[in-house]
Image (cartoon, rainbow, N blue to C red):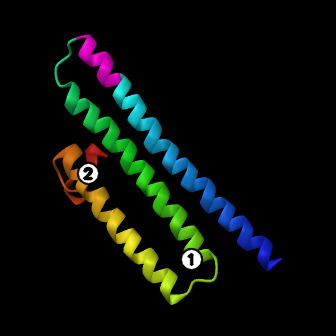
Amino acid sequence: MHMDFQKAVDAAGTVIDGVGATVIVAGALIAAGLAVRGVLARQAHVYGAFRRFFGRSLLLGLELLVAADIIRTVAVTPTLESVGVLAAIVLIRTFLSFSLELEITGKWPWQKTADAQ
């Protein structure tokens, strides 16, 4: 039974990894499509709109990838080494998320007002 749980958790992590990667790729494709449409329609601020849309997709995808890593590492017999690797991955992805948020909104995540959420 213990092995079945590990397989289920690993499968859940793999599915969430796939969803995260799909969100990133789909976001890039949709953002590119919207940008091409905007360029063809001669709209202003196409680049900024592209960056915001793709940045949000990238943030969501990164959050899903972190969730998958956490599920696989913590739920299946965590070792000191695996928890250390997870901590490094989470720190790097958190830094990327904060950087993307700053690029998209011009503010750090903790600087948002309550009505902006």
Which residue is tagged 1? Answer: 74
Q: How many marks?
A: 2
* Residue furthest out toward the right: 1
Q: Residue 96, relative to residue 5: is it above or below? A: above
The picture places residue 62, in percent across and down from the top left corner, at: 41, 55
Q: Which residues are magenta?
A: 34-41
Q: Amino acid at mark 2?
A: Glu
Residue drawn at the location 49% of the way across and 55% of the way down = 64
Q: Amino acid at mark 1?
A: Val
Residue drawn at the location 52% of the way across and 67% of the way down = 69
Disc 1 secondary structure class: helix
Is residue 39 within the magenta segment? yes
Q: CA distance from mark 1 to mark 2?
A: 27 Å
Which residue is tagged 2? Answer: 101
Residue drawn at the location 23% of the way across and 44% of the way down = 104
Disc 2 secondary structure class: helix
Q: Residues within 10 Å of mark 2 (few under 14, many from 20)?
A: some
Q: Residue 78, relative to residue 54: is it above or below? A: below
- Residue 63 quadrant: bottom left
* Image quarter hosting the N terminus: bottom right
Q: Nearer the viewer, residue 98 or 29?
A: 29
Residue drawn at the location 41% of the way across and 29% of the way down = 30
Q: Residues within 10 Å of mark 1 (few under 14, many from 20)?
A: some
The picture places residue 29, in percent across and down from the top left corner, at: 42, 31
The picture places residue 72, in percent across and down from the top left corner, at: 59, 70
From the viewer's perspective, tell me whether residue 92 is left or right of residue 64.
Answer: left
- Residue 14 quadrant: bottom right
Q: Residue 70, relative to residue 26: is it above or below? A: below
Main SS type for the magenta part?
Answer: helix
**N-terminal label among 1 and 2:** 1
